[in-house]
Image: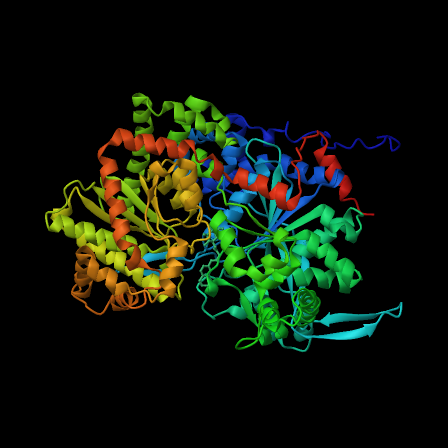
Amino acid sequence: MSSTKPLELKLPTPGCYSDHERAGIGADAVFDGITEHLFFTLGKLAPTASLHDLYMALSYAVRDRLMTRYLASQEAIRAKPQKTVAYLSAEFLIGPQLNNNLLNLGIQKEAETALKRFGIQSLGHILEVEEEPGLGNGGLGRLAACYMESLASLQIPATGYGIRYEFGIFNQLIRDGWQVEVTDKWLKGGWPWELPQPDEACFVGFGGRTENYIDENGKYRSRWIPTEHAIGIPHDVPVLGYQVNTCNRLRLWRADATESFDFYAFNIGDYYGAVEEKVASETLSKVLYPNDGTDEGRRLRLKQQHFFVSCSLQDMLRSLEKRGIAIEEFSKHWTVQLNDTHPAIAVAEMMRLLIDHYHLEWEKAWEVTNSSVAYTNHTLLPEALEKWDLDLFSSLLPRHLELIYEINRRFLQQVRLRYPGNDLILRKLSIIDEDGGKAIRMAHLATIGAHHINGVASLHSDLIKRQLLPEFAALWPEKFTNVTNGVTPRRWVALANPELSKLLAEEVGTDWITNMELLTKLENKQLDKSFLEKFGAAKLSGKRKLAGYIHRQTGVLVDPASMFDVQVKRIHQYKRQHLNALQVIAQYLRIKNGKAQGMAPRTVIFGGKAAPGYFMAKLIIRFINGIAEMVNADPDMDGRLRVVFLPDYNVKLGEQVYPATDLSEQISTAGKEASGTGNMKFAMNGALTIGTLDGANIEIREQVGAENFFLFGKTESEIMKLRNNNYDPKSYIEALPELSEAIRLIELGHFSNGDTELFQPLLNSLTGNDPFFVMADFADYLRSQDNVSRAWQDREEWNRMSLINTARSGFFSSDRSIREYCESIWNVQPFPVEITCDVNSLTNSSNKLS
Ligand code: 26V
C-alpha cells in the first residue's frame, strides 16, 4: 500500500437535493420515503405499522421534500438581502399540516398512490389521525396562519414569530350539555413538522432592577440587571407557498431553563431549588391562555409576551449582524407587524436593545423602531383591550417601564404643543392610565410606536378612528388605515372542498387557486340549469359527509336534504348564539302550534368553545344543548327540525363544516365583530349569509350583492342611539307574541327538564339590560329567517345565489389582504426563489466557522 497516494474522499456529489431521491415527487419516490422513515426514523416494519405510524412516515417524507425549497429560500435572502416581514403573533392556529403541504407541493395524488401500496385506500384515512396544534384561540390566530400561507404563496420573504405552547387551546367535551375542558396534548404522538434549532437559542431576563453607569467613553447609560432568566429555543415550521419555491419559516419559541442559574443552587446543595427554577422557566411556554379576561395567570401572560417578543427581536438583530448589516439599517431589512397588542411590548424592547445593547442615541433608536413597527387592532371590546397593572409591570420589566415613561414624556410634549393647556386630552392619550389603579395601555404604546395602525374591516377601521382612538387619529391621520381580512383559498376551498374545486377547475381552470378573481367567470353559468345542479350536488356531497360525522360524534341523525344552517365560532354574548337559539325555539313553537307552513326543513348546527372562565358563554352552550335535547326527541320535529351542537370546533372540523353549509349565521351586534373570517370561508364555499351590518359582513354583502344576502338588524349607529335612549328590552318582548312565548317556555324549564333556575341568568341578562341588543333585533331576525325559508323552496334559485356567492368572493382571499399590507404598510416586494443546484454547498459555506 503506497502511503503517498492521496486519500480519495467520497464526498456527496455537490448537487441539488431537488434531483435527489429523497426529494423526488413521484409516487415511487414517496413510497420509498415512507418505507425508509418507517424503518429508520420510527423503527417500524411496514406490515405492522399503524395508521399513526404511516401518518408520521408520510409526514417525514413530505417534510424531506420541503427542505430544498426551505433552505433555498433562506439562502436566497442571505445572498441577496431582501426586506422581510416579521409577523409577531402570540397565536398561530395553523391547523393540520400534511394535506396542505401535499397540496402546495402538488403531490396529493402521488401520496395517495404510494399509500395504496401499504393497503391504505384513501389519503383521508391518514389525514384523519393528524392532531392539529391548537396554538390559538380563534379568528386572530387563524388569520395569522392564513397570512403566513399567503405570504409564501405570493413569494414574499417572511418569518412568523410566536410561542410553541406545550398545551394549546383546550379540547372541548360536552357532558350533560355542559362544556368540559380537557388539556390539549398535541405533542404526545410526536409532531413531525418542526425543526428545533437549539444553536440559535436566545436569552431573556425578567425582574430585578436597573442601574446607571458611566461607560468607557464617559457616557451615562442604563442597564437592566434581571434576577430571572429563560432561554428561548426556536422550533421552526416550514411554510411552503402554493406551487412556488418560496418556503418561509414559522419560528416558535419554546422556553427552557438557563444552565448557569441552576448551577449556583445546585452547588450549594439545593438540588430541588435548582429544578424548581428550571420548571418555572419551562412554564413560560407551557400553556396558551384562553381569552376570557379573567385575572388568573396575568403575570405569566405578560412574561410570555415579553419572552417571545424579546427572542424574536434578538433574532432579527442577530440576522443583520451575521450579514454585516448596520443596525441603523434595520427597517430596510425587517418590517415588524404586531398582531394585536399581545406583542406590543416590542416597542419598548426594541428601544432597550438598540439603546442599551447597541448604544444608539434615543432619537436614532426611535426612528429605527417607529419606521419598522406597524400595529393591527382586532377588537373594540373594552374588556379585550390590554392593560397591565403598573406594579406588576414594573416588577417584571423595570427597564421597559423607564423607557415607556420616556416614550410617554416625549409624546405628551408633542400633544401639549398641539393642544396647549388641554389636560383632559393628555390624560386620554397617555400610555399610563391614571383612572383607578395605574396601568399601561398597550394599544397606546403600539399606536405611538407604530408607523401604521390598521383595523381589519372597513367599518372596524372607521370605528377605530371615530370611537377607539379619535385623538390619535386627529394627531396622525396618515397613520390610520384599513386592511380587510382575508382567508386562504388553498386550505378553505382547494383542500377542504375537493368536489367544488373540481367543478371550478372544469369551468375556469385551476388558476383560481391563486387568482380568485377568475371565479367571476362563473357568473356566466348562473342560468345554466345543469351546471347549477352540479353545483348543488357538490354541496350535497359535503353535507352527506358532515351528516356522517355528526352521527358518529353525537348520535343524532340528520337529513342531508334539509337546509344546513350553521353558526361556528367562539361562543361570546356579542356573537349572539343565543339569538339563534331563541329563533330555533320560535320555529319549534310554530311546528308545535301547526303554524309552520312554508318553513324549510332545517338542521341547525352550532359549534364553538367558551372561555373556561366565561360563565354566560358556558350557559349558552348548555342552553343550546337543552334545546337540542327537546327538539331531537320530539317526533313532531322529524323531517322538519334538528339541532346539533358539534363538540370541539377547530380548524380540522371547520374544513368539514364550510363545504357542507347552506346558510351561514353572522349575527353579531352591529359594531362588535371587528371583521369575522368564518363569514368569508362560508361565502367562498357557496353558503348564503344571514347577517347584520357588522365587520366584513358589510363588504361581503357589497361584493355578492344585496339580493344574495339575508340582511337584518339594527345598524351600529341605531344601536348607539338605542343605548343612549334608555333601551328597554321588555318593550320588544311584549310587542312580539312569538318572542314572549319562547321566553315563557324557557322560564317554565321546558328546555331544562323542568329546572326553572338553570337558565335564569341568561333570561335576566336578556330581559334586564340586554347588553347585546338581542331583543331589539329578534323580530327582524325572524323576518329575515322567513325569507331564507322562502328562498329555500326554489332550489334552483338558491343554487344560483349560492354560485354568485362563490363567484364574487375573490376579494376575501388573503392574497388580496397580503398584497394590500405589502403595498400600503410594509413596502415589500415578491422575491421569487430559484433552486440553484448548490443550495447545500452555499448553505454550508455561510455556516463556516471564521
Ligand atoms: C379577547 C378578549 C379578552 C378579554 C375578554 C373578552 C375578549 C373578547 C375577545 C377577544 C379577542 C380579541 C382579538 C380577536 O381575536 N379578534 C378577532 O380577530 C379576528 C381577526 O382579525 C376578527 O375576524 C374577529 O372579528 C375578531 O374578534
Return the residue nearer the eye: 686 or 847: 686
Identified at 39% across, 64% down, the residue is 612
Q: Is residue 436 visible?
A: yes
Q: Quadrant of residue 265?
A: bottom right
Above or below residue 439? Residue 110 is above
Residue 718 image position (x, y, % from top left)? 37, 56
Q: Is residue 388 left or right of residue 8?
A: left
Q: Is residue 600 left or right of residue 695?
A: left
Residue 106 image position (x, y, % from top left)? 52, 29
* Residue extending furthest toward the front: 420
Q: Quadrant of the N terminus?
A: top right
Identified at 23% across, 40% down, the residue is 789
Q: Quadrant of residue 69?
A: top right
Return the residue nearer the eye: 586 or 463: 463
Return the residue nearer the eye: 29 or 490: 490
Return the residue nearer the eye: 148 or 247: 148
Residue 113 image position (x, y, % from top left)? 45, 27
Identified at 22% across, 61% down, the residue is 733
Q: Is residue 572 visible?
A: no
